[in-house]
Amino acid sequence: MARVRGKFAKKETTAEVMDPTKVVGLSPFQLGIARLRRDRVAVIGFWVIVAFVFMAVFAPIIVKIFGLDPYKLDRSAINDYGLPKGPFGGISWDHPLGVEPGTGRDILGRLIYGARISLLVGTIGTILTTSVGLVLGMIAGLRRGIVDAIISRLGDVTLAFPSLLLLIALNQPFTQRLVDLGVPRGNTARLTYILLVLMIFGWVYVARLVRGQVLSLREREFIEAARSFGAPNRHIIFKELLPNLWPQIIVLVSLSLPGYVSIEATLSFLGLGLYAPTASWGLMLGDSVGYYRSDPTYLVIPGLTLMILVLAFNLFGDGLRDAFDPRSDRQQL
Amino acid sequence: MRKRRAFAALLVASGLAIAACGGGDGGGTTGEESGGKSASSDGIVDGGTLHILDVSEGATNLDPQRIYTGADLGFLGSTIQRTLTSYKYAAGVEGSELVADLATDTGTASNDAKTWEFTLRDGVTFEDGSPIECKDIRYGVSRTWASDVTGDEGPLFALSFIDAPEDYPGPFTATEEQQAGFNEAIECSEDGKTITFNLRESVGDFNFTVALLAFGPVPEDQDTGDQYTLKPVSSGPFKIESYEQGKELVMVRNENWNKDSDPIREPHLDKIVWHFGLDETVIDERMIADEGDDQAAIVYGGIQPQNLQTIFGDDKFKDRRTDGFDGFVSYTMVNMKTVNCAEIRRAIWLALDRDALRTAGGGPFTGEYAKGFINPRLGADYEEADLPEGLNEDGTPNVEAAQAEMDKAKANPDCADAYKRATETGLTRDHADSELWQKLIAIWIDSMDKIGIKIIDNPIEPSKYYATINETPGDLMSAGWAADWNNASTVIPPLFIKDGGFAYNYTWEDPEYDAFKALVDEAKVETDREKQGDMWKELNQWLVDRVWNIPGLYTKTQNIVGSRVRNAYQWYQFGWYNVGAIGLTE
């Protein structure tokens, strides 16, 4: 049977792997996917993430269909004290997860919109750190010598900084600086600042991993072979090195993304992230703390949502690592 | 006087109108609660330590010439700083009655109320036992002029009453000539017992002015300049033993204070410990739990809106809680430089969802919609102003009426710049940053969006709020104000006149300013109190018509004390407890 290539081959190849009587040649990537699909916990994590991404992407439509406008005040859902009417934070058909005390805004709607911010920061943060880390790591690994030394020491120095502390301490002056440089005031400036700092401190982890891999890969036979054929650097980087780096990078990405989601929530919670009235999980958490006596549901729901998303990413990331990192103890195949 | 920091942020919900106030004309929506057993003197046993729980990192000010926040005036006046006159120790409206303190009576006016004379009591002393003389009071007052040393947060408007040299810079840098000129304005008798104030104009109630702590005595040889605010010299029944910012301030009894020389203060406590830097949520939690030392604790500030239902929905707190009007009016200043168009200002008022703002802050507990800038408590000066047509009494927005005003503004060439700023650039909304404001700003943005006005949120760190808006005012700014005494002369001039010190919104940019100021100057010197009251009422109406500021609420404050605390009544004059009168049960 001729092997089918491309994305439509996935099902078939998996079936072939499952069938012990057939011996089929598979790329490491296909092997990894196959292993991943057998890891039930990781699959659940994956679908939870998909659900969140779906919610975030289609937030305006979902909110419209179900009438969950996150910015609409609902005076009728709160009593004279400003607290939600009805038990469990005002959970009702109109407001499936209750309403925000004081304003009566819908919590589910705010969570859905908050997911956009969380995932946006997570995704952009990860893309930025990964690309910077990848480039610097590869340069360090390929060039070696003085360039490697400079990049590696720079990484060491960066790691020595207490990044979260710096992120908090430099918040006001640097955001102001960005505004002076022409970044729109408010959320745009704050987000730009957060992402920049995340990038400045996040690239080291990717760069170190990539550098180590490149150092070991460049001595391998297939690279030697390519070189002996006179393959240009471009070919070696894109055709020989990168395909062998992807699995590790994907694992790292899936594990660092929830970290960035948490950092956004932490900063907003501390009042250093997004500005109200933007719906953000961190802002909701910050606001809800004061209500832990009078409206505990309000405290539980955003916290639980954040936990579920981060947990899903971590479980999925663990599954990815098990599937793609052959040295892992927990591998199943 | 001004409300303090975070509480300004908390209570200054902003922009509101109607419904009646408990003080006057019926139709009030919430009852007031005076504190039950905790307000009575039942079972007080002398001695013990009172704890004050506070969110902020330290006292706003301890220097008498710098103190100008309501709660501090009452608190520090009743404990460490005596003045020539003071207010009666009593709950309710009786607490605004002027009584003699360092002076033997409440002063004698002559020369058409341009000269005021006070005679000091025998036996009044500072904490080191040295006698308080006329020169100490004169020196104390003079420090208020030295804004380079004592800041500009004091009651600067009161300075304009005194006939001191125009260029008097305060005692620290004054030339001999300037000081001599000042000493003529405030004269001391040979024996140091009589102090005479010579005023520029007639001030019929100057004896109320001298009840401000800024008119309190300071011993010149112990003045530490700008450090005096860390350890002032006491003249009251308590003195400061230690003060560490961010941690605590401890007051103990002043052995050199003697009851015979002080007819009003009746201290019961041995010690007062003021704890700083506590978390708001933790404070409420500790007060609700009422355990250990917290049974002898009071809170600087108020109950957070999220806990109002817990405390006011349960009768077990009946003897520990208070709920009442605090004499303040909250309002939103509109920058007259940038929004120099009455139609737009009126449109903002009409379109604002004042009901939502009030609900977010705790509903009727936040206060009643204000009808102008003069609190109903100022009986003689208060009259409901005619509000703009279309303003809903229940605080809900009237978008149609607001839009009509916006259309008028659009058609008016004088409003072109302001209209463009409001609808295109956006109006900067200054407020002290707080969790509550994250909701309030959403309501502002939502309300203004309906008439096409853009709002730019500008949260400011609470402790720097007033300093910031003083330096770089935004387009819309929150604030709150209460009269210093029972006369609107302590409301309208400070808030709207250039020299008043608190007109952060450039009122003088309005072409009508000169006409307004002339009326104010006339009202200030009117000695017929009834006539003067009518003039304030007219000016209040004028302000409502021109909408220099947007009236907010006659604010209310809710508070809770520990179960062993007694005599914790809201002191009418200051909107907080009379701390000096508090006692504890066994």
Image (tube, rainbow, N blue to C red):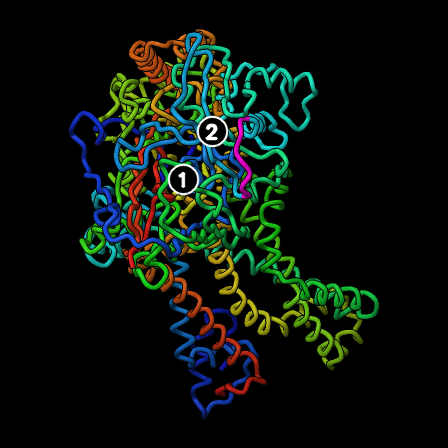
* Spot occupied by residue B537 in the image (x, y as percentages of width and height): 31, 15
Give the farthest residue toward the bottom. Answer: A21
Mark 1 vs mark 2: tell me if same chain: yes
* Spot occupied by residue B376 in the image (x, y as percentages of width and height): 27, 25
- Nearest the viewer among A300 and B64 is B64
CA–CA distance in space, label 1 to label 2: 46 Å
Chain letter of the residue carrying label 2: B
Residue at mark 2: B426
Quadrant position of the N terminus of chain B in the picture: top left
Q: Residue at x 37, y 15 (%)?
A: B546
Mark 1 / mark 2, whichever is N-terminal? 1
- Nearest the viewer among B335 and A247 is B335
Disc 2 secondary structure class: loop
Q: In this view, does B265 lie above or below B542?
A: below
Residue at mark 1: B78
Q: Which residue is drawn at 34% across and 56% down?
A: B296
- Nearest the viewer among A17 and B239 is B239
Q: What residue type is labelled 1?
A: Ser
Where residue B387 sits, quadrant-wise, is top left
Q: What residue type is labelled 2?
A: Gly
Q: In this view, does B190 lie above or below B355?
A: above
* Spot occupied by residue B342 in the image (x, y as percentages of width and height): 39, 16
Where residue A182 sits, quadrant-wise, is top right
Magenta residue span: B128-134
Residue A246 is inside the magenta segment = no
Q: Report crowding for label 2: few under 14, some 14 to 19, many 20 or more residues within 10 A (C-alpha).
A: some
